[in-house]
């Protein structure tokens, strides 16, 4: 049965989508069968994997509204072992359209149940807010992976995220666990990055991944070319870091 990891942080600009794209690609590079689910209306994971989000039929929006089956919503990415359920701006309206639906917190889970066994890993990129889409991701997932940017306000909002995770555990998904924290945009030249890492380690009672993702120009460039970092610049520091993260994830998952 595939392991489902939701990548969540309601704070924007922390490397959430970058982590979703590149963790997925590096797991696929290791021969794992991966399905990435883009649950962010911005659709940046979709375009970052080379898919034209503006001209897509059967996106996660149609899936959530019951207008297509989950198998119809899964698209090839052009990357071996990596499939995608894409997203675009249409998803922004889903919150309102789902208002009258019973058990709307479980729409994604009920669909994913059909195909979970087809994959080793399912990676969900959540929107940068704690809304119904994020709740759907948390009811579907086994674990939550939280990217934290190495900057002064790193811990801001994190307590709210952890509170939401705890609420979902109690009321909607008792099997949900905290996968852990991964530090992103680390700059070894600054004392601040080091201080943030130490601060989080001292204040958070959660698993922290050993792999730290550096601030890296090639990593920032890759999405505009529609390819993950391991294909864009296979020897870059960003590619090596996400490969190490993928190996850590695999070790913890025993997959």
Image (cartoon, rainbow, N blue to C red):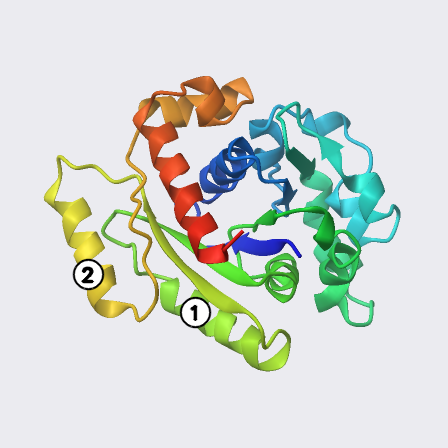
Q: Position of residue 247 (x, y in %)?
A: 42, 43
Circle number at residue 162 = 1
Which residue in the rendered view is the most extreme toward the front? 254
Task: Give the residue at x 25% y 61%.
Answer: 200
In primary-sequence order, the first of circles 1 and 2 is 1
| Residue where numbered disc 2 is placed | 199
Circle number at residue 187 = none
Would you identify the image quadrant in which residue 110 lies?
bottom right
Q: Position of residue 64 (x, y in %)?
A: 78, 53
Would you identify the image quadrant in which residue 109 lies?
bottom right
Q: Secondary structure at mark 1?
A: helix
Q: Is residue 246 toward the left or the right of residue 255 in the image?
A: left
Count the marks.
Answer: 2
Q: Position of residue 39 (x, y in %)?
A: 63, 48
Q: Nearer the viewer, residue 254 or 73?
A: 254
Task: Give the residue at x 61% y 80%.
Answer: 171
User: In this rendering, is residue 43 above or below 226?
Assistant: below
């Amino acid at each position: 049965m595939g392991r489902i990891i939701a990548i969540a942080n309601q704070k924007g600009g922390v490397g959430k989508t970058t982590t979703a794209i590149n963790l997925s690609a590096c797991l696929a590079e290791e021969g794992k069968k991966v399905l990435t689910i883009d649950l962010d209306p911005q659709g940046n994971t979709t375009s970052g994997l080379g898919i034209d989000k503006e001209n897509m039929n059967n996106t996660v929006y149609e899936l959530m509204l019951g207008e297509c089956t989950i198998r119809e919503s899964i698209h090839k990415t052009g990357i071996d072992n990596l499939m995608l359920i894409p997203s675009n701006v249409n998803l922004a309206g889903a919150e309102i359209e789902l208002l009258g639906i019973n058990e709307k917190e479980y729409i994604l889970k009920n669909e994913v149940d059909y195909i979970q066994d087809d994959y080793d890993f399912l990676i969900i990129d959540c929107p940068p807010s704690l809304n119904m889409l994020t709740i759907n991701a948390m009811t579907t997932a086994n674990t939550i992976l939280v990217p934290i940017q190495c900057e002064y306000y790193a811990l801001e909002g994190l307590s709210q995220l952890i509170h939401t995770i705890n609420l979902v555990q109690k009321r909607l998904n008792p099997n949900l666990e905290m996968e852990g924290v991964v530090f992103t945009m680390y700059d070894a030249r600054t004392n601040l990055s080091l201080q943030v890492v130490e601060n989080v380690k001292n204040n958070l009672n959660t698993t922290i991944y050993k792999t730290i993702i550096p601030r890296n120009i090639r990593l920032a460039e890759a999405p505009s070319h529609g390819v993950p970092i391991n294909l864009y610049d296979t020897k870059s520091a960003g590619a090596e870091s996400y490969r190490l993260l993928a190996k850590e994830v695999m070790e913890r998952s025993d997959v």
